[in-house]
Amino acid sequence: MPRTTDSKKAKKATPNSKTKKTATKTKKTATKTKKKAPVSKTKKKAVVKKAEDEYVPPEFKKLAKREMMDLAKRVVGEASVLVSEYLYKKKDISEFEISKKLKIEVNDARSILYKLFNYNLVTYIRRKDRVKGWYISYWTLNPKGFVELKAKRLKQRLKNMKDRLIREEKNPNGFFLCKNACMRVDFDAATEYGYRCPECGELLNPQDNSKTIQNLKERIKELEMLQA
Ligand SMILES: [Zn+2]
């Protein structure tokens, strides 16, 4: 839209008294453009566009876009990233539009959308198409669902780590490590292997796991801080 650029330039130029005349002229043009715009081609689209631009629920601030896409990729798969990116900060987008814009089959788009829906990462509404008579689903990304999923995954990671810490603390020297670091096994497995690494044949030595324990404790602390 070159006209917009012109009017911006005009505004900048206004303080300069020399260009007053020109500025007034440009202003007139700008007003004309303003009046013209809603009447012309954008009238129908304007409603949708406004809704799209305004759809920024507060949860969007809690999670970076990159993090959201990463979550989608982890739980639904690579193909869902494209769809999630397209829906980002848009509202009520039909599966046909998604299919068309991303150049994928409608059924593939739907399949991805329902998978995202299973994780509460999208919501949808159904509207009957007046012309065709069938129902069309309109989809919206659900940032709240992303925030909840992130918290859930963090909680799970924390639980896994705490379980592991308990196991490590119960077995102060109970783990055996190959000199070449092929594997780390517990006492039972080490006995079974005759204290020889089945990969390289080196001795399996009891490992002082105090460092592992310390490491786990630090990581747990970090995760707990993220959770708070
Ligand atoms: Zn080995």
Image: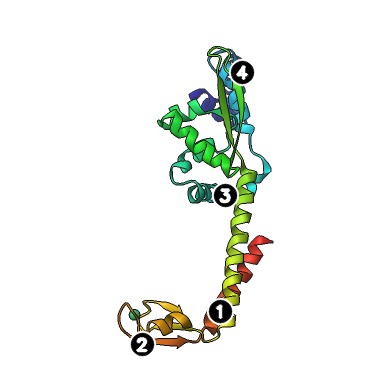
Sequence-wise, the earlier of marks 4 and 1 is 4
The answer to whether marks 4 and 1 mark residues whose Cβ atoms lie closer than 8 Å is no
Q: Are marks 3 and 2 in contact (CB under 8 Å)?
A: no
Between 95 and 118, the one nearer to me in the picture: 118
**Label 4 close to label 2 by CB (< 8 Å):** no
- Which numbered marker is on residue 31? 4
Number of the label disc, if any, that sits on residue 168:
1
Locate residue 113, reporting x and y percent: 52, 36
The nearer-to-camera label among 3 and 1 is 1
Q: Residue at x 60, y 76 (%)?
A: 166
Disc with the residue nearer the chain's start (3 vs 4): 4
Q: Which residue type does callout 2 highlight?
A: Leu
Q: Is mark 2 within 8 Å of ligand 1?
A: no
How far, Cα to Cα, is label 3 from label 1?
A: 35 Å
**Number of marks:** 4
Amino acid bearing label 3: Ala
Which numbered dot is residue 203? 2
Query: Is residue 53 rendered to the left or right of residue 228?
Result: left
Image quarter of residue 227: bottom right
Amino acid type indicated by mark 1: Glu
Of circles 3 and 2, the one toward us is: 2
Mark 1 or mark 2: name the one nearer the start of the chain: 1
**Separation of marks 3 and 2 at Cα, in angstroms:** 48 Å
> x and y percent of residue 89 in the render?
58, 37
